[in-house]
Amino acid sequence: MKGRAFGLGLGGNTASTPLCLRDAVDCLRCSAMVSEARVSRVYLAKPWGAVEGGDFLNCALAGRWLGSDKGLLAVAREIEAGCGSPVKKAGKARSMDVDVLFLENGTSCPELILPHPRMHLRRFVLVPLAEVFFDPVPGTDGLTPGMMLAQTPDKSNITRYEGVSLG
């Protein structure tokens, strides 16, 4: 197997988010730097924290990344910018947010903290991630997304959203 295992959380809460999710997933699937991409179903969740706008649509993508950690972060930021989202969200509504959740063998850049420091606290991240990544998440002492989901204190309601097909 080439590359390093990686996982992304994708989401947004504007009218353009469904199209942005499809475009982001297509972009990642077509990237020469991504192999074995698996995409979860889309879920609807209330905003977590003080965020403008309505409910969020969320999904996860996991696979193998053939580039550097900085390259993965750059792709995430390019996708956000392509959807019109600012890098600094600061509680604003966003059409697309791409979080790097984990990358096998960690990271060398200080702006990327892995695994994502709040991943284990967020059902809207763990529910879709548990659909597409079954191994222990690098940097979590052997915890799989399913194990983290069973242990999370977050009991918020996450529902499947049928209005977007990422197939």
Image (tube, helix red, strand yellow):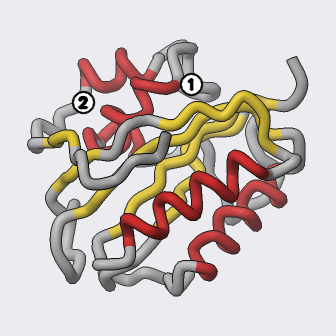
**Could you tell whether 24 is left or right of 93 in the image?**
right
Question: Residue 152: percent from the left, percent from the top?
Answer: 24, 30
Q: Residue at x 63, y 54 (%)?
A: 26
Q: Residue at x 52, y 86 (%)?
A: 84
Res 160 quadrant in image: top left
Viewer-side residue, 60 vs 138: 60
Give the x, y percent position of residue 118.
39, 47
Name the secondary structure under disc 1: loop
Q: Position of residue 12 (x, y in %)?
A: 36, 67
Q: What crowding class fits label 1: few (fewer than 14 Cα within 10 Å), some (14-19), or many (20 or more)?
A: many
Cα gap from disc 1 to disc 2, whole angstroms: 15 Å
Residue 6 drawn at (x, y percent): 67, 36
Q: Amino acid at mark 2?
A: Thr
Res 152 label: 2
Q: Is residue 137 visible?
A: yes
Please say if 49 is above or below 34. Answer: below
Along the horizontal axis of the image, is 38 left or right of 15? right
Q: Which residue is mark 1?
A: 137
Q: Quadrant of the N terminus?
A: top right
Name the quadrant containing residue 150. Answer: top left
- Is 91 located above or below residue 105 in the figure? below
The residue type indicated by label 1 comes to: Val
Is residue 44 left or right of 165 when viewed as pictured?
Answer: left
Q: Badge 2: few (under 14), some or many (20 or more) residues near its Cα, within 10 Å?
A: some
Is residue 115 at least partly visible in the picture? no
Image position of 76 with respect to 138: above or below: below
Which of the 4 image quarters holds residue 141? top right
> Which residue is depicted at the point 35% across and 24% down?
148
